[in-house]
Image: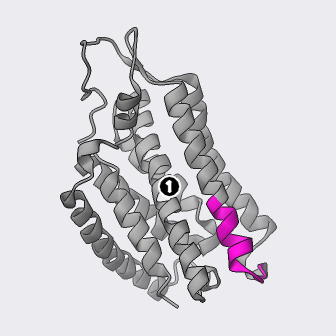
Amino acid sequence: MIDLNDKQIDEPVSGKVTLPKIQLIVLIIILIGYPLFSTVMNLVNPSENVEIESRILQLYLPSLMFQALVFLSLILVILKDPLRQGDSYWSIAENIRSIGVRREDFSFTNLAIGVIFVFAAILILNMISNVIGYYGFFEAEDITYLLPRTPLEKVFWIALSISAGVTEELCFRGFIITRLSILTGSVWPGVIIGALSFGIGHLYQGWAGVVLIGIYGLMFGLLFIARGSLIPCIVAHVLQDILAAFAV
């Protein structure tokens, strides 16, 4: 289970953990800005109107740059304006641990759990997708145009998969769940609200995609809580995205 007070420090500290204002602002931006941006972009430029001349130049490189910007910005915010408990500021190591990344988490166990999780999740999501398709609840968008075809495109896709897996898990599980738990005293608002935001942020996949990705995000949140670590979530996310390259 996640415990923000499970910290390795030299001197004991007391008092409530305080969320800095800049981290609160970033939390709101991620929760609201991410799905809002996706919705606006989908309305302005629907997927059926997208003309692809170069997946690398039009899709993969811009996405890599965006993911890198988000990752660096979030890390900078966490380290420049750290959490505080009572009158004591948490160290760099403690702040990194607070988002679910610890040295001891880089283990074979977490790697294996991440691999097992992704295949179990794919099986579950395929069953849900079949139910949605059978009953026609939502219309799914064809997103195969996003997937790589050439060897060079697959190299960029793998790089993007790693970037997205790390950045999105850092944002939607590591940051949202732990920061909302500070504000609410419970991990569950972060799990549920984060999954909703994560799902809506994939509106380009149609409402069927929103539902499936939202459920997927919920499953990732449960994995994060169960392990108290972001590592198996990142492993599963990266592996799932890489496997998508072999779907075409």
**Horizontal side of residue 196 vs 153, given as left or right:** left
Query: Is any part of residue 222 visible from this angle?
Result: no
Q: In the image, is residue 101 above or below residue 144? A: above
On the question of residue 75 being in view, the answer is: yes
Residue 54 falls within the magenta-colored stretch? yes
Q: Which residues are magenta?
A: 50-64
Identify the residue at image location x=35%, y=29%: 94
Q: Quadrant of the N terminus?
A: top left
The image quadrant that residue 57 belongs to is: bottom right
200 is higher (above) or lower (below) than 147:
above
Q: Inspect the image, locate mark 1, and give the three-letter code of the amino acid beneath it.
A: Glu
Corner quadrant of residue 28: top right
**Secondary element at tag 1:** helix
- Colouring chosen for the image of the structure: one colour
Going 71% across and 76% down the picture, which residue do you hit? Answer: 47
The total of numbered circles placed on residues is 1
In the picture of the structure, the residue carrying the numbered disc 1 is 168
Left or right of 54? Residue 161 is: left
Q: Is residue 127 above or below residue 68?
A: below
Q: Nearer the viewer, residue 111 or 33?
A: 111
Measured as percent of width and height from the top left, residue 200 is found at 58, 60
Image side of residue 3 versus residue 78, left or right: left
Residue at 50% x, 82% y is: 245
- Counting from the top left corner in percent of width and height, residue 231 is at 33, 54
Could you say which quadrant of the image residue 48 lies in?
bottom right
Instruction: Pick the residue in front: 195 or 229.
Output: 229
Q: Identify the residue shown where x is 25% and y is 12%.
A: 11
Q: Is residue 248 above or below residue 180?
A: below
Residue 106 image offset from top left, x and y in percent: 27, 52
